Every structure is written in C-alpha cells, then in structure tokens.
Amino acid sequence: MTSKKTFFLTPQRLIVFLLYLIPILVVCGLVGYFGVNIPLYDQWVLPYWFEKFHAGTLTLKNLFAQHNSHRIFFPKLIFIALSFTSGWNILWELYFSIILAILTFLALYRLSQITAQNLTQTSLHLANLSSCFLLFSWVQHENWLWGFQIAIFLINFCVLLSCFILSTSSLKPPVKLTISALLCSIASLSSAQGLLSWLAIIPSVLAIEGSIKHTKKRLLVWLCLFLFSGFIYSINYRQETDTVPVVVSDNKIFATVHFFFNLLATPFLNSANINWLIGLIIFSIFLGLTLLALFSLKSEQLIRNLSPWVSISLFSLLCSALIAVGRSGLGADYAILASRYTTHAILLPIAILQLSPRIIFNPTLNFITISRSNQLLIFGFLTGILVSLNLVRSANAVVYVNSRLPLIQSGKTCFNLINYLEQSTFFKTSPQSCFSLINSSQWRELIWDSAEKLNRLNLRKFAQNVAFIDTPQQTYGEITSPQTLDQVINISTTESVQLKGWINPTKNPHLVLFSIANQTTFFANAYAIKSTEPPLNPNELSSKNLLKWEVEFSADFLPIGTSIIHAWIYNSTENQFIKLNHQVNLRVFNSTSLEE
C-alpha cells in the first residue's frame, strides 16, 4: 500500500494530474466570469413547468411533451430539481453542465486505459491530454453559458459511458447491454440526436465477446430497442412550423454537405473559405483509419480496443449530419457561427486522436516501420497542431463573448426591473431592446409572463420601491441630441426618433432607460459604450471616460400628441432611478392628418 501511495505522489504524476486540471479550471473560471444569472431563449418556457410542478399538476405526459422538435424528458427533471434547489440560479445549470463534462472525460479516460493495448504511458497521456483540452475547449461557449444545453452534455456523457460499459471485461454481456440500453434511452429522451446513439453504439455491441450466434442475437435485440425508442419518440409527434423546411434539391444537397464539412472543422477554424476543406480532411482521416482497422479483424482484442472509438466517431458524424440536414437552410456558414453545434462535433477529432496510435502504431499491423520514439514525435506534432488551432479558436471565442457580456448583463438588469418596464413595442420587437440577446422577438412576451410565474413561486426577486431622483446633486449624464430646449419638435408617426447622449461610467450595467412625462415606467432603452468624442455640452467634465449612447425608434411607438421624453440610469446599490440632464419635447401626429 505504501509503495502505491508513493508512486501516485511522484512529481511526474503530479505534473500530469495538474495538466489535466488546466482545461477544466479554465472553463470553470470562464463560466464564473462570463456566466450571467438570466434565462436565455428556450429557458423562458421553463417557469411554466416549474409552476405545474409546484402545483402538483405536472404529469408524465407534460414531461414527455415536445419542445420544438425534441423530447427533453430528463433535462426537464434536471431543470426542475436545480431550480427549486437554487432558487433558479442559472449558474447552477452551467456548473452542472461542467460536472457532466467532467464525468464524460472520466469515462473517456477509463475507456482509453482499458483499450490501451501496446500503448506507452507517454502516448496514452498525450492522447488523453489532447482529448481533455478539446472536450473542455471554449469553442463551445454557447453551450457552456446556456443552461438549457444540459441535454447536449448529458447525451455525450451517456454515449461515452455506454462505450466504456460495453468495453469493460468486469461485467457479463447481458449486464453490459442492459446498462448501455438504459443510457441510450436517457439520451433518446434528452434530445432528438440522442436517438442516434443506438446506431452509433452498434460497433461496440458487435465487439462484445461471444459466438457469432450470440452476436447476431444481440444485434437483433439492439435494433429492436432502437426501433422501439423511435416509436415511443414518434407518439403524438408534430413537425414544428418554425423549423427550417427540408427541401430535396441539388442546391439543398450541396448546402447540406457544405454545412456538414464546415461543422466538422468548426472546433479548429472559422474561415468560410477553407472550413469545408479542413472538414473534408478530418472526415477522410476517419475513413482512412476505419479502413486500416478492417485489417485488424483477425485480432479480437484489437477489435474490442477500436470499436468504442469507432462508435464515438459515428455518433459525432451522425449528429453533425442531422444538424446539417436540419439547419443547412440557414446557410452553410451558419455551422461556423453557431458554436452550440460543436459539442457533438468535437467528439470526432477526439476519437481520431484515440484511434490513431491504436491503429498506426500497433506492432501487429506493421503499417509504419519507424522507431517508437519517432512515432511518438510524429503523433505529438500532429496533436500539437490540433490543440493549438483549437486554443486559438477558443481565444477568439473569449474575445467575442467578452464583447457581448455587457449586453447580456443589461438584459439581466432589465429583467430585474420588469415591474417598471412597459410591454411596449420597442421592448418586444426592437433589435436595440435590452431583451434582444436573451430572447427572440417572436417569444419576447414570455418574459413578462415568466416574471409573474417566478414571482409567485418565489424563484426570482424583482426590484421594488425604486426611488426616482429627478434632481441629482451631480451630473450623471445628459441628452445631447436633439437639443430642443423649450421648443417642441413636430414629428410624424411614419418618421423615426433618434436620441443621443452620454453618461458617466458606473459599476452598474451601462443602460439608459426612457420615460414619457411623469410616468414611472419606461418604454425604451439604449446601451452606453466607450467614446473618446467629447459631448456637445461637457459641463467641464473630462470626456475621456464618458460613455455615449444613442437609440432610434419609430415615432409610432409614442402616443399621439405632445410627449416629453426623459432619460434615466439605474443605480442598483441605492435602488434609484437617476434622471439625466435635459429632455426632448415632441409632438407626434398621424401622417394621414398632415394636411389638416
């Protein structure tokens, strides 16, 4: 026991362990920094399920009901459990996704160990470290920062764990198949792509030890379970009307293939010109390795070592193909822009990293006759290129997410102030609305409905009794355009209103809110950004750190007649709305009554 303990604590093992921790700690830190406790997009429907659960009216039919094109039975259970445990703190969902990713990597690591015949510890750690960096890479930032994507990480975990279970020698074949079938069932009822796990796992099912007769029976049972899962999934299934239509044509086929190859390369590049080529190369490498693996059919042990990685590759390819069919109508380059699709796609290069040394450097196959040290050097060079490209792509993603963070935080502030926001056309439809990055315009009304439900369930606290400071003791900002002074600007409902100004930077989100006359509610907002341009009326304030803002909206958003527009900022520390200097006087009239 003592010698084993000492061996575990050797400096070499400690260094390797710390290397494995780096990508995990980095993604935890980035989620902690960029994560915002605000629901995003599909999450706005969850309060409906929370309310039904709280009222005791939630049924299996409700859990089984479609969400878009998916059955998210098990994710719904997770959302409900986390919400009532944390007071629906979205960060809990984000860290739960990280936990699932960690469990996925542990399954991958153990699978790598039990299939590491003839691999040195150095090559094994090199493959696993590279896999770890890819699995936790920031190119998946949409999924890391969107709690609703728990389903994606859950499905990956089920697939990897299923491959491990089927490959382990400590369980009997019936037990392996039972556990694996349960995992595929969970994946199937987590999202549509989970159904593909049944097909992807087939190579691992075929590799289970036993006679040809037993293998045929297992395959038949497995296919029957897949068909049964598909039948269950199809019960009361309806095609969503807002999904991208699937039209079979030459252009559609080309766009789908283009999208598919773009997606395969997205973890490493974001070039619309060459992504498809890199994706084609990655796909060709997998095909080449698979063909080489066919030469190993005489070695049962080698088959068992390779089959789980082939299954993981197939799952990644099938998911990428399904996404390509469903989303290629948005354009082939959409695969590069939408990082949420990379979590399944990234399993392919991970599997390739694991397959390569097991096939090419296997002494029984004799594909390469160079020395072991040179083999390791070549493998290290190739993995270094992949990881380096992924790190650069991840760094670019950090910059992108950082640029959007203030807007997401402004959305959180607006949701906190929901009691003071009118259900105006601006907030519901404008791309400048502070809700624009947290929900799509066609579903934005759900925000007010969800707020009522969350308030009743005591799952979210909203700002109340906020003081309105009309005459602050210092200048916090001002409206600089249009400068109406005491004059009234006449404007038609067919014209646009454009307001500009500046504010002093504060610790609060740089959000400006607009009210009409003496109303204590707001109908529009603007974002303030850094500017080096001095304001028109600097009032002896330094312009170096001032934040400028501007907003444009249709005059039709305003009531007919005279409107006095005031601008405000919110001080969350003091729970105050503070008025900015100056106001805009407008007289809105119907364009049809212009002659009158």
Image: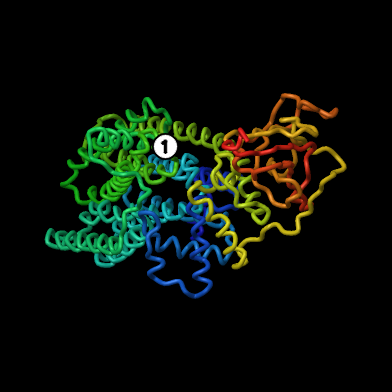
Which amino acid, by three-letter code, is at mark 1? Pro
Q: Is residue 422 left or right of residue 315?
A: right
Question: In the displayed structure, would residue 252 be above or below residue 540?
Answer: below
Q: Is residue 535 left or right of residue 494?
A: right
Question: In the displayed structure, would residue 120 be above or below residue 452?
Answer: above
Q: Could you say which quadrant of the image residue 170 lies in? A: bottom left
Compare residues 403 and 179 and report the one nearer the observer.
403
Does the image show residue 391? yes
In the displayed orientation, state which residue is furthest to the left. Answer: 213
Q: Percent position (x, y) of residue 245?
A: 31, 44
Question: In the displayed structure, would residue 333 be above or below residue 41?
Answer: above
Q: Could you say which quadrant of the image residue 595 lies in? A: top right
Compare residues 254 and 362 and report the one nearer the observer.
254
Q: Quadrant of the C terminus?
A: top right
Does the image show residue 129? no
| Residue corresponding to mark 1 | 267
Compare residues 63 and 446 and report the one nearer the observer.
446
Residue ID at (66%, 60%): 461
Q: Tag 1: Cα neighbours inside 10 Å, few (<14), some, or many (≥20)?
A: many
Give the SS element for disc 1: loop
Q: Could you say which quadrant of the image residue 215 lies in? A: bottom left
Q: Percent position (x, y) of residue 577?
A: 76, 48
